[in-house]
Image (cartoon, rainbow, N blue to C red):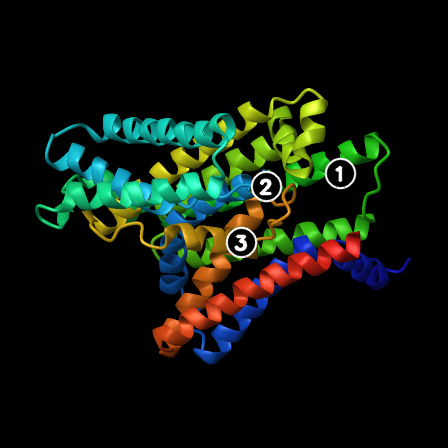
Amino acid sequence: MGFLAEAKHLIKANIRDYGMYIALLVIILTFTVMTDGLFISSRNISNLLDSTGYIAVLAVGMTLVIVIRHIDLSVGFLAGFLGAVAAIFLSQMGMSVFLVIPLVLLFGVVIGLFNGFLIAKVGIPAFVATLAGMLFFRGALLNVTEGTGTIIVNDDGFNALGNGFIPSLMEINELHLLSLLVGLAGILLYIYSEISNRRNKAKYGFEVVSFKIFIVKLVFVSFIIGYITWILAGYNGFSWTVVIMLLVVVVYHFLATKTVLGRNIYAVGSNPEAAHLSGINVTKITLFVFASMGMLAALSGILFTSRLQSATTTAGTLFELDAIAAAYVGGVSSAGGVGKVTGAIIGAIVMASLSSGMNLLGTGISYQYMIRGGVLALAVIFDVLTRKQRA
C-alpha cells in the first residue's frame, strides 16, 4: 500500500478520532483568514485557552460520565456554588489558599459520591438525580451570594490561578524560556508515549501503521505543540490555567488508557450487564466516575472564581451544557463506551474557537448560539453515522 493510500485508509478507519482535529484546523484557518491574522495572534490564543480552561476541566469529567451511559446536569451550578464557597473561605474567613483549595476539592468529591449513590444504589435515573442537584446548587449559590450579589476575592495567590502565568526565568529573543521548556517537555513526552504504544502493539501482534506514516504523525503533532508553545511564549507564556488543564488531561488520559480502572470504565459503558457478569463492580465504577466529576466541578469553580477574582450569583450558568457539548464534539458516543479525554479538550477548544472567532468578526450573540447548536447537532449526527458504519 502506497503512502497516500495508507494515509487515506488510516483517516477513514479512524475518522471519529481525526475528524475533530480536521474540524479544528479548518476553523482556525477560516477565522485566521477572515480576521486578517488576528485570530492566531499571541494575545487571542492565550485568552482563548484561558477562557477554555474551566469548561475543558468539566468536559474531561463529563466524558467519563457519558462513557458509562449517564449524564450530570448539576456540575454547572455545583462549580458556581463551590467557587463561592472558596471565595467565602478566603475573603470572609481569612483561610489560607493552601487549605481552601484541597478542602473545596474534597467537598466536590463528597457531593459527587452522593450523586453516584443516588444513581447506583437508590436507582434514580442520572438525569433526574442531577437535575435535582442542579436546582439545589442554583438555590445554594443564590443563598450564599444574596447579601452582596458578588463576593470579591483579594487573595493574590488564588487569583493567579485564573489570571497569572508561570515565571519566565529569562527571555530569549522576547520568548519566555520556561514556557519553551514546558513545550519541549510536552513534545518529548508525546514522542515517548507514541513510541512506547507502537512497541507494545508490535510486541503483542497488533497492527501498526507504516514507519513513514508514524514519522509524519510524530512530526505533525510535534510541530503543532511547538507552534502553540512559540505563540504563547511570545506573549506571557503558559498561564496557570493552561498548566492545570494540561495536568488534568495527562492524569485522566493515563487513568483511562493505562490502568485497569480505566479499562473497567469503558467496559461498563460498552455493556454494563456483561461487565457485571465478568466480575466488574459496576456500582463502584459509577461512584468513582461521579466522585471524579464532583472534584472536577470543584476545580472548574475554583478556576472560574479566580479568573473573575470574585464569586457571582450567575456563576456556573450553562457550564454543564458547554461541557456536554464539548464532550460530544470531542467524539464521545451517546451510546456509551466510546470517547477520549483528549477528545474532550479538543471539543472544548473547538467550541471556544467558534465563540472567539465570531466575537472578533462581530457576529451577533443570537447567531452565535444558533451556530454552536448546529455544530453540536452535527457532532451527534456524525456519531450516529459512524456507529452505523461500524455495525
Give the residue at the far top of this rendering: 279
Which of discs 3 and 2 lies nearer the camera? The answer is 2
- Percent of width and height locating residue 167: 32, 43
| Residue 384 as seen in the image, left or right of residue 28 | right
**Residue type, mark 2 in image:** Val
Q: Which residue is mark 3?
A: 346
Distance in Å between CA atoms under marks 2 and 1: 25 Å
Residue 59 can be seen, yes or no: yes
Graded by Cα atoms within 10 Å as few (under 14), some (14 to 19) or many (20 or more), the crowding at tag 2 reads many
Which of discs 2 and 1 lies nearer the camera? The answer is 2
Badge 2 marks a residue whose secondary structure is helix
Q: Looking at the rendered structure, which numbered label has been put on residue 67?
A: 2
- Residue at 65%, 30% in the rendered image: 263
**Residue type, mark 1 in image:** Arg
Badge 1 marks a residue whose secondary structure is helix
Which of discs 1 and 3 lies nearer the camera? The answer is 3
Q: Which residue is mark 1?
A: 198
**Residue type, mark 3 in image:** Ile
Residue 18, compared with residue 58, is above or below; it is: below
| Residue 45 as seen in the image, left or right of residue 161 | right
Distance in Å between CA atoms under marks 3 and 2: 17 Å
Distance in Å between CA atoms under marks 1 and 3: 23 Å
Residue 41 found in image quarter: bottom left
In primary-sequence order, the first of circles 3 and 2 is 2
Residue 206, compared with residue 103, is above or below; it is: below
| Residue 318 as seen in the image, left or right of residue 117 | left
- Percent of width and height locating residue 86: 22, 36
In primary-sequence order, the first of circles 2 and 1 is 2
In primary-sequence order, the first of circles 1 and 3 is 1
